[in-house]
Image (cartoon, rainbow, N blue to C red):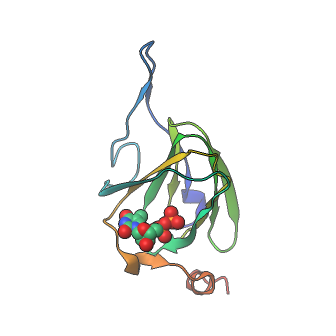
Amino acid sequence: MPLADCRIIDLPKIMDQRGNLTFVEGGNHVPFDIKRVYYLYDVPGGSDRGEHAHKTLHQFVICMSGSFDILLDDGFKTTKYHLNRSYFGVYICPMTWRYLDNFSSGSVCMVLASAPYDETDYIRDRDEFLKAVGAA
Ligand code: TYD
């Protein structure tokens, strides 16, 4: 899937004086069924995460608190997003290298994923990724 398919997706926002509410429906707001949710928290300021791709997994990344940057790369082109609100997120297609950095102290990053955890779906070696996408 090309990097162009990865994108910012705005989520519904129900504004209320008691506090705002946002929701995400699999197959509606994100283009996959949600099979797993995980989150990064207690992240020290300046940390970085990611540095891998997934062969088949679709993901949607939301910044629930604080801020961080996410760099996406299909082996040919890169796109960088700054996430700092919980009413939008970044959809990451399969075969996209991702690198998350510039976390503000105490950030919370929530990820919705299309499948349960499977280490065999990861590509953690950069050269292997570049070969797989035909960029090396
Ligand atoms: P990893 O996906 O490499 O983290 P990040 O991309 O945020 O740097 O996962 C870190 C560790 O956690 C790794 O040992 C695999 C494990 N893990 C699970 O057991 N289940 C999960 O759902 C996830 C996302 C990771």
Who is closer to the viewer here, 63 or 76? 63
Looking at the image, which is closer to me, 104 or 100?
Answer: 104
- 47 versus 22 height, above or below: below
Q: Is residue 10 left or right of residue 115?
A: right
- Quadrant where ligand 1 appears: bottom left
In depth, the one of 94 and 86 nearer the eye is 86
Marks counted in the figure total 0
Quadrant position of residue 116: bottom left
Q: Quadrant of residue 71?
A: bottom right
Query: Residue 47 is drawn in which quadrant?
Result: bottom right
Q: Position of residue 53 (x, y in %)?
A: 52, 72
Visible residue check, residue 31 = yes
Image position of 34 (left or right of 87): left
Q: Residue at x 39, y 77 (%)?
A: 119
Residue 6 in picture, x, y percent from top left: 55, 57
Residue for point 63% across, 49% down: 68
**Among all residues in the image, which is located at the extreme top?**
17
Relative to residue 81, is residue 17 depicted above or below?
above
Q: Horizontal and vertical percent for residue 75?
A: 65, 74
* The C terminus, quarter of image: bottom right
Above or below 94: residue 24: above
Residue 56 visible in the picture? no
The residue at the point 61 percent across, 40 percent down is 84
Q: Residue at x 33, y 48 (%)?
A: 26
